[in-house]
Amino acid sequence: MASRAVSGYLLCAVALVFLMLLQGTQSVYIQYQGFQVQLESVKQLNDLVGQWVPSPGLQDQSPQPSVCHHPALPLDLRPICASKDVASIFQALRSIANDDCELCVNVACTGCS
């Protein structure tokens, strides 16, 4: 009886690990100017840009966009903050993320320009 319970727990654990791995492979990535970021991270960037207002002193001290200093900035976006083109890269990523045809997630996008 105990061996059946252990076997059941093991099967559940294997299924859970499999589902977690499957979820990780379902991510959509955007590649732009040598950076590869998850679409979900760019969506979080859009939310951060819209909601966070940094202190005025922080804006004066740094040439980076203020969102680079946000503690909730996704990890895969942080290397972009070290780029000299950070503002234009963030703007391009946000634009790409809002264009379903650019991401090729919509079958109707075969004729997009």
Image: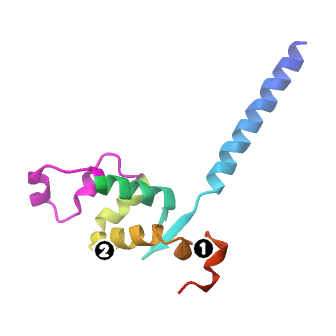
Q: Residue at x 57, y 62 (%)?
A: 28
Q: Quadrant of the N terminus?
A: top right
Q: Position of residue 69 (x, y in %)?
A: 25, 52
**Horizontally, is 39 left or right of 106 in the view?**
left
Q: Position of residue 8 (x, y in %)?
A: 83, 25
**Horizontally, is 51 left or right of 38 in the view?**
left
Q: Residue at x 39, y 67 (%)?
A: 94
Q: Can residue 84 be seen? A: yes
The Cα–Cα distance between marks 2 and 1, rounded to whole angstroms, is: 22 Å
| Mark 2, secondary structure of its residue | helix
> In the displayed structure, would residue 59 be above or below residue 36?
above
Between disc 2 and disc 1, whose residue precedes?
Answer: 2
Name the residue furthest front.
Answer: 108
Magenta range is 51-74
The dot on residue 18 is none
Colouring convention used in this rendered image of the protein: rainbow
Q: Which residue is mark 2?
A: 88
Q: Amino acid at mark 1?
A: Cys
Q: Quadrant of residue 76?
A: bottom left
Between 99 and 26, the one nearer to me in the picture: 99
Residue 67 lies within the magenta run? yes
**Horizontally, is 56 left or right of 45 in the view?**
left
| Mark 1, secondary structure of its residue | loop
Q: Which residue is mark 1?
A: 104
Q: Residue at x 28, y 57 (%)?
A: 68
Q: Residues within 10 Å of mark 2 (few under 14, many from 20)?
A: few
Q: Position of residue 55 (x, y in %)?
A: 13, 49
